[in-house]
Image (tube, rainbow, N blue to C red):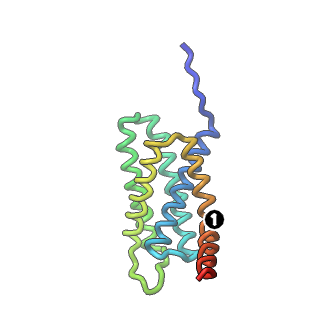
Amino acid sequence: MRVYHNRNDSDIFSAFAARVLITLILELSWGILLFGLRGTAQKNIIGKVNLVTQIILNLGLCYGTLYVGPMWGGFLYIALEVLVFAVEAFVYNRYLPWPEGKKPHPILYALTANLFSFGVGLALNTYCTNTQIRLIGLICLVLWYAGPWLCRKLRSQVQNAQ
């Protein structure tokens, strides 16, 4: 019996990149909308820390499940997510500049943003194929850049209509 696989490295890399992109956009949006983290320095720190932690998380899951198997992979996933939260909470607590006039909650931000992205990621991995996840990543990227422009355009049209 011969066994063939139809997955190549570009499939794995593009699905990985889509997952990282979706997580970055989710956690940045969470910070902007709920915690007022709109500054360039804030977005840079959140983006860089998430990029590093997502690479570690995804590599750990990819290689870890090969060695521990799918059953223990769930435990590995939770352990790595706790590690990601701990790293992000430490860095945000120490280095994230908080908006003036707002009470700082960097650990709460790290916890809620990670729970939110974990839940979305779990749903995507449960109900979507890698191709669908790549498409969702592309849509998120387009909305990330086009969203503010569309909001300004709609707001100006509403103001002109009044």
Give the left or right position of residue 118, taking residue 154 as reference: left
Residue 118 versus residue 101 in the image, above or below = above
Give residue 13's quadrant in the image.
top right
Q: Secondary structure at mark 1?
A: helix
* Residue 153 vs residue 105, the one in the foreground: 153
Q: For the view shown, which residue lies furthest in the bottom direction?
A: 101
Residue 68 versus residue 24 in the image, above or below = above
Percent across and percent down for residue 94 are: 44, 73
Tag 1 residue: 145
Q: Quadrant of the C terminus?
A: bottom right
Percent across and percent down for residue 7 are: 59, 32
* Residue 83 vs residue 151, the one in the foreground: 151
Percent across and percent down for residue 33 are: 47, 71
Query: In percent of the image, x 60 and y 29: which residue is there?
Result: 6
Give the left or right position of residue 36, taking residue 73 as reference: right
Q: For the view shown, which residue lies furthest in the top direction?
A: 1
Percent across and percent down for residue 20 are: 54, 53
Q: Amino acid at mark 1?
A: Tyr
* Residue 19 vs residue 158, the one in the foreground: 158
Query: In percent of the image, x 51 and y 66: which residue is there?
Result: 29
